[in-house]
Structure formats: C-alpha cells, structure tokens
Amino acid sequence: MENLYLNNRFLHIKPEELTLSLDQVNRMSLDEIVELSAVVVGSHNSFSRGWLELNGRHYIMQRIFENAGLNNCTVPDMINELVKEKVSDEDILQKHPLLFDYLVHYFKTPEKFFREYHMVRKYAHWKPRKKPLVLIYSELGRKFEEVVGEILEETGIQFFKYNCGIKGCEPDFIISQSHWMDAKLSEHTVFNSETIQKYEPHIEKLTIIYLRKTSQLEYKRMVSPKTELVHISYFIEPLPNERKIYYNDVLSEIEKKAIKYLV
C-alpha cells in the first residue's frame, strides 16, 4: 500500500471534505481512481492496486455520500418528503444532484430504488417519468466530447484530459499549459455557462468547439481576447472524404437528438 502514496497527487485532500459528482468520478482515469481511493480508504488498509482499480470508484462515492449525509436510512426519508412535494426525476437531478447520484450509483435508476423499497405506487405519481432532460443533454454532451476527441486524434492534435492541476477546472482537452479546449453541444451554450470566466484567468488561449449553430455569426470567431468559438466542421475538413462522411453522419445524429428534446 505504501507505493500508492509515492507521488500521490491527492495526498492534500481530506476525505471528510471530499465533494465530487458521480460524473466527475466516472471521468477520472484509472490512475487517478487508484490514487484518490488510496487516500480515501487510508494507509491503515492493505488493499492492492488491482483491488482499488476494481473497487476504487465505489469507495470514493461511498465517502462522498457519507460526507453529504446520504445513506440507506436518510435517503428513503428524503425521498418520501420529495414524493409529498410531487417532484420529478428532473427535480431531483436539478435540486438534489448528489441524491440523484446516490440512486444511480446504488440502484442504477430512481425507479429501481422505488421497486426495492416497495414504493412503486408512489413512483407512479411522479411526473414526468421519462429520463430527465438534464441527464439527456449531459449524455449527448458526453457523446459529442468523445467524437471531438476522436477527430482531434485523427487530425494529429495531441491532448490529455481533465486534470490541468488547477482546482475547479476540468477542461475537456488540454493541449498545453496555456491552451485548453472545451466541447459544447450548441453555439449559445458557452454564453450560458461559466466556462470562459472560470478558465481564462489560468491560460492564454481557450478554444470552444461546438456542434449546433444557433446564430448567423461566423462559424469561427473570437468571443474574447483569449477565447475562440470554432465549429466542429473546421476540424473535420482536413480528413479524408470517407472520414468526413462518417463523422458528419455521427454528429448529425447527435444534433438531431439534441433538437428533438428542445422545449
């Protein structure tokens, strides 16, 4: 176990203060999971690296839920209160994200939680019962990010992901210490987020790659002295025709699904 603490990037973290979302933990690399879970379980445990590779994410989330006061005693009571308020899955996701993470982590879906606790009739009163829009857009955003990563690799742009070493910043693609990239589903999304304000103080250049065009402005333009907004087509253009066709088809499907769920 001692080797897991050698050059461990998370030794400064206090497990009792750990706050991450399930999505953030799932996005961590295997090395990051091993190092963080080693800190979470503590040096007094003799778990091997292989064991932490298999179980580390679970123990990290277990600690996060514990810090938030979520367990098999408190969660049913919280759900009962929410049912009385007639909230939906989407309400939980937006108002109580860690509670939703708890249900997904331990039960896969909120509905399975209700089945487990014999509350199916109560769940039937939830409106709507469809997958939350916030979750749908999150999944589409993740898919777009994956495709952007594949395109960047094919065009020879080297990058690594998420861990820039600056607290609170998790850029999708790190080109260098001074140049980060982020992927957004829609052109206007960047103006409804804190990405520019959060990232610009730490870098010289920010490139935001977007899929859906929502204005009549240029497909590639500067939106601040440091930030450029670039349509994904600019990165597809250098590829061979057959790859252009493939990626355009994939991206078209993502865009169609995003538009489908617009209110």
Image (spheres, rainbow, N blue to C red):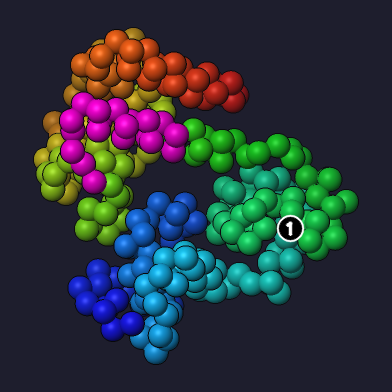
Residue 143 lies in the magenta-colored region: yes
Q: Is residue 24 left or right of residue 256?
A: left
**Residue furthest to the bottom:** 44
Q: Is residue 64 at all visible to an observer of this figure?
A: no
Against 138, residue 103 (above or below) is below
Q: Which residue is mark 1?
A: 113
- Give how far across and how far down residue 191 sits, in percent: 35, 31
The amino acid type of the residue labelled 1 equals: Phe
Secondary structure, mark 1, is helix
Q: Is residue 14 left or right of residue 118?
A: left
- Give how far across and how far down residue 31 sits, in percent: 32, 62
Instruction: Give whichever of 191, 118 is nearer the camera.
Output: 118
The quarter holding residue 204 reads top left
Instruction: Give whichever of 243, 128 is nearer the camera.
Output: 243
Q: Residue at x 42, y 21 (%)?
A: 251
Q: Residue at x 59, y 59 (%)?
A: 105
The quarter of the image holding the N terminus is bottom left
The quarter holding residue 211 reads top left
The quarter holding residue 166 reads bottom left
Residue 101 lies in the magenta-colored region: no
| Magenta span dominant secondary structure | helix
Q: Residue at x 35, y 56 (%)?
A: 29
Mark 1, Cα crowd under 10 Å, few <14 / some 14-19 / many 20+, is many
Q: Residue at x 58, y 21 (%)?
A: 260
Magenta segment range? 142-160
